């Protein structure tokens, strides 16, 4: 059996919905949380620590009957900038979408600065996205402190 076929067997095929592929394995649950997949009733299957030829360990998520808006997809750029979304209709991949790094991010991550107003009052966080060396960091709209990948906390 070829590698590709084995991969397909790891998580069974989808009839209608979205396959989110090429997620770094360590960020699988963050992607689930960012997209709110823990709060919906659609059928979901996922696999983690799958071998990938290009990525080391990758993860994949398959959600039935759910199709994302580009704005929603872009939110996962924080943790899975190389993810691809495959739109499946009647078992066929009918469209592939890629993640685009958004200019700003609202209400997902926490600000690293303990003194930041967003950590003391009920104000949703808001960041400008800054990219350096392919890595995404967040600059707080309120306190201007940078939250880098290492300190990125997504509740
Ligand atoms: N897939 C699925 N159910 C289907 C069709 C496809 O779960 N009915 C999954 C495949 O297992 C794969 C992804 O959707 O993980 C994309 O499918 P396809 O484009 O056929 O695979 P690749 O060519 O490997 O895609 P890429 O080049 O993006 O890795
Ligand atoms: Zn802040």
Image (cartoon, rainbow, N blue to C red):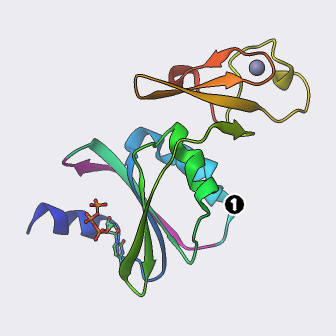
The residue stretch that appears in magenta: 42-53
User: Could you tell me residue 33's position as x and y percent?
Assistant: 62, 49
Nearer-the-camera pick, 35 or 105: 105
From the viewer's perspective, is 110 left or right of 83? right
Q: Would you say residue 69 sits in the magenta stretch?
A: no
User: Could you tell me residue 101's position as x and y percent?
Assistant: 53, 41
Nearer-the-camera pick, 24 or 104: 104
Task: Name the image quarter holding the C terminus.
Answer: top right
Residue 118 picture quarter: top right
Q: In what element is the residue under mark 1?
A: helix
User: Could you tell me residue 99's position as x and y percent?
Assistant: 48, 50
From the viewer's perspective, is 142 left or right of 31? right
Q: Which corner quadrant of the figure contains ligand 1? A: bottom left
Name the outermost residue toward the left.
1
Main SS, magenta region, reads: strand
Residue at x 73% of width, y 39% of height = 106
Nearer-the-camera pick, 132 or 19: 132
Name the outermost residue toward the front.
103
Query: Can residue 48 be seen in the rendering of this structure?
Result: no
Residue at x 69% of width, y 14% of height = 145
Q: Is residue 145 above or below residue 22?
A: above
Characterize the local packing of mark 1: few (<14), some (14-19) or many (20 or more) Cα atoms within 10 angstroms: few
Q: Which residue is mark 1?
A: 39
Residue at x 76% of width, y 32% of height = 126
């Amino acid at each position: 059996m070829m590698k590709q076929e084995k991969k397909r067997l790891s998580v069974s095929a989808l009839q209608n919905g979205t396959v989110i592929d090429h997620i770094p394995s360590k960020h699988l649950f963050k992607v689930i949380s960012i997209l709110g997949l823990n709060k919906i009733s659609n059928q979901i299957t996922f696999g983690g620590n799958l071998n990938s030829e290009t990525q080391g360990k990758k993860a994949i998520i398959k959600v039935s009957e759910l199709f994302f808006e580009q704005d929603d997809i872009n939110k996962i750029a924080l943790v899975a900038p190389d993810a691809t979304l495959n739109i499946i209709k009647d078992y066929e991949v009918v469209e592939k979408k890629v993640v685009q790094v958004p200019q700003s991010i609202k209400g997902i991550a926490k600000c690293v600065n303990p003194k930041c107003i967003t950590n003391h009052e009920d104000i949703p966080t808001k960041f400008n996205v800054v990219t350096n060396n392919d890595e995404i960091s967040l600059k707080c709209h309120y306190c201007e402190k940078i939250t880098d990948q290492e300190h990125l906390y997504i509740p």
